[in-house]
Image (cartoon, grey):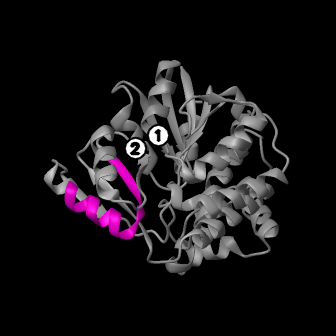
Amino acid sequence: MSRAFTFPGQGSQAVGMGRELAEAFAPAREVFQEIDDALEQKLSKLMWEGPQEDLTLTENAQPAIMAVSLAVVRTLEAQGGFKLADKAAFVAGHSLGEYSALAAAGSFTIADTARLLKKRGQAMQRAVPVGQGAMAVLLGLEFDAASEIAKEAAQGEVCEAANDNGGGQVVISGAKAAVERAIEIAKTKGAKRSMLLPVSAPFHCALMKPAAEEMAEALSQVDLKAPAIPLVANVTASRVADPATIRDLLVRQVTGMVRWRESVLYMEAQGVTSYLEIGAGKALAGMIKRIADKEAAIASVGTPADVETILKTL
């Protein structure tokens, strides 16, 4: 069985995330402490006690989601007595999850990943004043149709497909007025449902160019090793292992589309038949189920019970 470890993106955060893991496993506690120390912030306390509105802030949500993913990875490795590279053909992550995937594969230290994601969240928030940008999900439309709607709605403003999540779910991003126009157009083009997303900035579109420039500078100052397992990158939907290429793709990812549907199809074409979502929530597993072959084994691993269950199959 060829296996991929996948890592969730923003939206998976919830108060209480990771607490059970920390209570049950020393390696998980060590990850949370390492991230608190790296950020000089009690992120774990915010994760476990809230308030939700502070946890949802992009600069907190991004490292918090990574923290749970890496706590699960370290726990699986410690409890199972193996390294991730022994059990996976690929790693892949959805947006910020790409950083979690790279940390899990040994490209970044956990401390560097936490600092990079804190900066990424802050840079994305600074790039566009609150209220000027928006994102919306278009349901029931395939990518080509959704992309055409975004182009039609732009009318000289930025409006682009941001996430191709598969199964008739495409997220668009851009100037607020243009995104609102796209929602109205989608209603006339067969969309089952279209709605604004509760996000604080228009991620993965051209408006994020200032954030991409900040991340280029930040990434240039961090040691990035070749991953022990090939990464399937958001921007190209294909494997990459060269550190210089990975660095470039992480910069391009800030303004580029998350090609998740194509990424899953690529892994499937490479023989992957099992997908594990590592970390908080189950959103990514749901996406993969809509894309992958119906015979594929798909599971989420985010709690002590999940860890115990999945270790029996690894």
Whichever of callouts 2 and 1 sits on the residue coming sooner in the sequence is 2
What residue is disc 2 on? 165
Vertical arrangement, residue 241 with respect to residue 174, above or below: above
**Mark 1 — residue?**
260
Query: Residue drawn at (55%, 64%), measured in percent from left and top?
Result: 17
Q: Residue at x 37, y 37 (%)?
A: 289
Residue 243 lies, with reference to residue 37, above or below; the image says above
Please tell me whether residue 73 is drawn above or below residue 280 in the rendered image. above
**Residue drawn at point x = 68 percent, y = 60 percent:** 117
What SS does tag 2 mark? loop
Q: Pointer 2: residues within 10 angstroms few (<14), some, or many (20+)? A: many
Q: Which residues are magenta?
A: 169-185
**Place of residue 102 in the rendered image (x, y in percent of width and height, measured from the top left):** 70, 43
Look at label 1 and name its amino acid: Trp
Q: Give percent across and percent down for residue 229.
A: 70, 30
Q: Residue at 65% across / 67% down in the picture?
A: 123
- The amino acid sitting under disc 2 is Asn
